[in-house]
Amino acid sequence: MDSSSSRMRMSVIGVVVIACFVALFARLWYLQVMEAPALAVQASQNRTRVVASEAPRGRILDSKGRVIVDNRTSLIVTIDRNQLRKVKDRDELIRRVADVLTTNGAPIKVSTIEKRLADQQYDQLQAVPIATDVTEEVVHHLAEYAEDFPSVTTERRTVRYYPYGTTAANVLGYTGRITAEGLKTLQPGSDPDGVVKTYQPDSIVGLTGIEAMYEQELRGTPGIEMVQVDYRNRPVGTESYQPPRPGNDVQLHIDIEVQIRAEQSMSDRLAVLRGTPQRDGTIRRSPAGSVVALDPQTGGVIALASYPTYDPQEFANGITQERYLALQNINGASALLDRSISGQYAPGSTFKLVTATAALSNGLIDANTSIYDDGVFKVGNPEQEFTNAGKQKNGNINLVRALTVSSDVYFYWLGARMDGSTLIQDTAKAYGFAQRTGIDLPNESAGYVWTKADKRALHNKYPQAYPEGDWYTGDNVQLAVGQTVVTATPIQLARAYAALANGGTVYQPHVAWRIIRYGGSPAVLADVLRTIDPVVTGTVSLPPDVRGPIVAGLGGVTSGEGTASSAFVGFDLGAFPVVGKTGTAQVDGKADTSFFASYGPAQSPRYSVTAVMEESGFGAEAAGEVVRHVYELVAGQALTGAGSATSGTRD
Amino acid sequence: MLHQSISSRASARSRRDPTSPLRHVDPILLGCVAFLAVVGIIAVYSATRGPGPTFSHSYLFKQTMFVAIGVGVMVLLTLVDYRKLHDWAWAFYGITTALLVIVLSPLGDASNGSQSWFAIGPFQMQPAEFAKLSLVGVLAFLLSEFRGDIDLRRLLALLATAAVPMALIILQPDMGQVLIMLVIVMAMLLIGGLPTRYIVVLTVIGVMGILVALNSPVLHDYQRARLTAFMNPTDRSTSAVYNLEQSQQAIANGGVLGRGLFDGPQTRLGFVPEQETDFIFTAVAEQFGFVGGAVLLAVYGLLLWRIWRIAHIARDSFGTFLCIGVLAMFAFSAFENVGMAMGIMPVTGIPLLLISAGGSSIITSFAALGLVLNVHMRRFR
């Protein structure tokens, strides 16, 4: 081989090496200069994990600023599954943990611990809580013998605390771990600085009541720690940390004292009546009831009681399935149903407010229009017979007295006269019946007030369930006294009587009043972040010649020959005049539903209080007395006893 | 004169004698070697100290120790005229080939699926590293004996000489080392005067051989996947692709100026596998950025240029062939190792010579450079 060829081949080697290195430079330039930003983002996602820590939820205050939902520290025991994997005698460790918990006042089974450890809802990076609300002894023991309990740690976690126990549980609601569904659908709020309150798979959220409705306010801003992890997902350091910030406090219109009084009176009265016979001999089961107290000037909800109720504390650290089912059947009634807003009842005589308003404002009658009430009213062809309760004869009677003594015949007559029109239905809708009130609580019912067209449509749609499609005069007669073709919720009744009280303004009832800075005082203006203004949803035209006779009639109910006079014996009506109406709705085969809808004091109404009690008898003997107890508190009068089982007259 | 020490006499003589080897040490090559070895120690330490808070120093000590041993071996190999080493080539070849046989016996150790190691106390020895240098030695010996006159019989002799260690390494299996040997053989045959027609025939056979090998049951699936992963970067099914992605993300993470020493998060947190050996360039590029990576490559290029230049100006063909073999070994290792880390070459376990952790490869590298230096120092004698 000659030297020029050798030289050429040396050059070839040199060129090949140069070419290779040029390729390396080019690739290095591409990766580190051109592609760097995109690839670096991927790299950063690779090595960081987000670990969120829940912030305390905002508290809930009553109208006087008393804390009715607070936070407390719960001691919990957790196991880190990453570390547990490295523990040699794993089963032995878990048995020891169960022993320590059981002997220190927090009994737990090994199988329960295993079940929690296997739960897929926890993130790999998180320790799994295996016992909550353990005693300080457990914490001390585990700390003292820490080397015997690898992977086991104790933690102090913030959970809900209810200083007033079960009071207002139906309003407050409860919290719980977010559901997979909720994680997708819940719209996170943002704190005053605009930081979004993101949700994580283990976030605690409001599930019902105010907790759910004001979730965006109450939820704290979670602490977000960007944890650096190595290639085995083991945490090695922190890249950034944003500490948790508590949510906002929510102040309610609820006055916890009024709430307690309403709940106590309700359950006491139900207990007295339960098992006793009403006048026709039917045994009262008295399983459930509700009380609503509204501020007629704003629609603010001062009290909202529902019986039976539950202890939201049971939900603070998660509730068992068995207990949850048990709560749904307490004497045959569910504790989880808020009857004050979702219970739908034929309102009976309390609905005469609507009939009277319709008749007066349309000029059918005036204050002095009288008829002769012989206890029986006959109408239609074929003839139907309607009677007063107990076929009581009231003689010559006008509207005022008809309301006071609850003459059904007078209203049968009005119902018959308004047949063929929708005057009653229209007036009912003006008062807010047959539609949701829009209260800031979930699961409200709308009730209904049927028209001729509604009845026909229902029959056409469900001929089996509604065999009768024609509207008879008898239907309008029933409508006039709040039976058969009409249902209402207690909150709707309270709102209608509040509208009567304030001269015709129908408000959207509101439980929440103001949003307060966490831990702040409602009395300090700077701490009030936002006030929820009253919302007017409609008006009822109530000129003096309409409102006057009605108020006069209802004003007499609590005294003299009024249907609720027995319930108000001893109550100082001079100091606090109560305008109200008893109601008794017949339910086939059961004791009557008892109503009392009212407001007071008459001259400057500040409360509209309605009570409804299922299978408890006449309006006065059950609901009337409960309402009286509420007024006793707000009027500053002495509380009287729960009374005897039978008092009052049929209305 | 009798009172003078031996060394001072030698230095006095070198001052006077223009052909004295000591006057012809290549300072640029030495500078490159020193730079790369120091970078290597730092890079290996940064890749192995862990995320803290307590850092592991074991690799730092080992790497420093091996560099020290390597420097000693290099100095040793410059003291004797390389032409006298001529006769030792077969002996060295015999020893390394024997080690390659023994490593396949139960005396050898397996790790990562390859039976490539001898465990000696806390250290591991990889005979394939030494086998590469011994192959360079015997091929240089044979080619210088043939004086550029290579017929088919001689070619077969050359190929057979190369085939024995390569076959033994295939049995381990360690495809990366086989690939380097292949490149060494090709480069040396090219410079050794192989007639053009044989080059064409060998190239055709080589290409077909690679294609057949990739589709034959000789290769395990994981090996095939590794070798082809760089061509299908979107196929995320293999761990080879995961490694490539992690490595490229880490390099990109360095950006222009790098994250700074010990501040490369991907490196620190161990996202890149084998980052003290096969993916050592990743650690350098993430911590020192494009600037650092480019400087490293430039110094490496400078080193290669010096070796190429020494091959060119060597006094005899044995020296030239030695240098070309060493050049091929360094150049291809660097291209394959760095190219793999950046996703333009197949994944094979080849160290970045002088930089990657590993006693065998460090000592072999220094020995090889000692020979090159030797050729340079004695080019006038």
Image (cartoon, coloured by chain):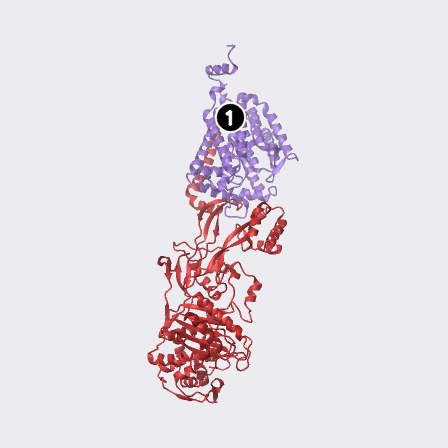
Chain colours: A red, B purple
> Is residue A422 in view from this perspective?
no
* Quarter location, residue A23: top left
* Quarter location, residue B206: top right
> Is residue A246 in view from this perspective?
yes
Q: Nearer the viewer, residue B128 or B281?
A: B281
Describe residue A637's horizontal placement relative to residue B180 as left or right.
Answer: left
Residue A375 position in % (x across, y down): 46, 88
| Residue in the image at 47% along x and 54% along y | A54
Amino acid beneath label 1: Val
Q: Nearer the viewer, residue B309 or A551?
A: A551
Q: Dot 1: few (<14), some (14–19), or many (≥20) neighbours within 10 Å?
A: many
Q: Which residue is mark 1?
A: B372
Q: Nearer the viewer, residue B317 or A629?
A: A629
Residue A115 position in % (x across, y down): 59, 56
Residue B316 position in % (x across, y down): 51, 22
Compared with A276, B141 (above or below) is: above
Residue B119 position in % (x across, y down): 61, 33
Compared with B159, B17 (above or below) is: above
Compared with B5, A629 (above or below) is: below
